Image: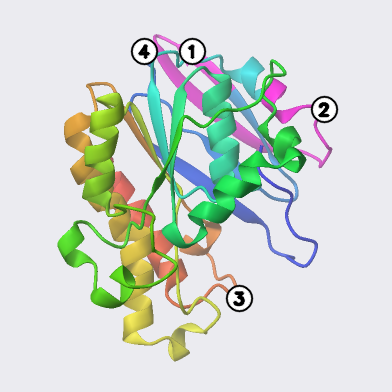
Amino acid sequence: QPPRASKARALSACAVTLGLGLVAGSLPLVFTACRSRPPLAVEAHSSSGKLTANTAAVPWRQPASSSVIARKALNVDLSGKVAFVAGVADTSGYGWAIVRELANAGATVIVGTWPPVLKLFQMTLKKSSTEEARKLDDGSLLNIEKIYPLDATFDVPEDVPEDIKTNKRYKGVGSFTIQETVDQIKQDYGKVDILVHSLANGPEVTKPLLETSRKGYLAASSSSAYSLVSMVSRFGPIMPKGSSVVSLSYIASERVIPGYGGGMSSAKAQLESDTRTLAW
């Protein structure tokens, strides 16, 4: 249930999740979430134990309930599954929408949040104004089992520079590198069945490509693309056979989107390429 596109954004935006492995049972799943005009109608078919999905453009109309439509297309029981969604920091983005659908399907949902906004996100979830966003299909309120501080720019504690260690925005959050997060989740839950990479960062995203520095370009690639490679490598040992990894991309990976600079379009293209290679 992705958020509506901004009126100021004339170009359509599409986040595509590319699945690795199996989500549940023996059906390989690939989900697509688009924010576009017109939207895509998704039709799922099952034949010979395999799931396929056909898409077709349809005239725009506000669906009565996108979650109900999704449920009619595919009914998945994720009871007993542990899902970790990396990159959730509000109740309006794609990451949050994925968290809700995983919870609707019965999964135990845990998330990773960028340390500088961790406390703000935790306080937001306590506000009554978020109850509507937390409401699940059965009327109950979404309960995120645990929120882990996560800065996917860093693989291990030794990678964290001194200026980050002493930064007041990171003060008191505890361990936050990828490996430390894996170790903590292993201790808390023993496994991860579904890993969702829903994070990206480009410090120079507002700059045109020709004005982007090497440092800014590589930072975008590190945070937005290589982080998936590192997460698959480090989470892999605690993911049972039949687990799934999902990454979110953006249409700028294949089309020119003015204003989406700083190397971010390149990072998204890299993310898609890496997802295909990891899946193979």
The image quarter containing residue 82 is top left
The image quarter containing residue 154 is bottom left
| 35 over 54 or under it: above or below | below
Q: Which of marks 1 and 3 is nearer the N terminus?
A: 1
Three-letter code for the amino acid on which mark 1 is drawn: Asp
| 72 over 161 or under it: above or below | above
Q: What stretch is highlighted in magenta?
A: 44-69
Left or right: 132 as drawn, with respect to 238: right
Question: Which secondary structure, mark 3?
Answer: loop
> Mark 4–mark 2 contact, CB under 8 Å?
no
* Residue corresponding to mark 4: 25
Left or right: 131 as drawn, with respect to 153: right
The image quarter containing residue 8 is bottom right
Q: Earlier in the sequence, mark 4 or mark 2?
A: 4
What residue is shown at x 56% (from left), y 28% (from top)? 143
Judge the density around disc 2: few (<14), some (14-19), many (≥20) Cα neighbours within 10 Å. few
What residue is shown at x 28% (from left), y 44% (from top)? 181
* Residue corresponding to mark 2: 64
Q: Earlier in the sequence, mark 1 or mark 4?
A: 4
Is residue 278 among the parts visible in the rendering? no
Counting from the top left corner in percent of width and height, residue 278 is at 24, 44
Residue closest to the eye, 207 or 144: 144
* In magenta stretch: residue 53: yes
* Residue corresponding to mark 3: 258
Residue closest to the eye, 120 or 100: 120
Question: Which secondary structure, mark 2?
Answer: loop
Three-letter code for the amino acid on which mark 4 is drawn: Gly
Q: Which of marks 2 and 1 is nearer the N terminus?
A: 2
* Residue corresponding to mark 1: 77
Disc 2 to disc 1, C-alpha distance: 23 Å
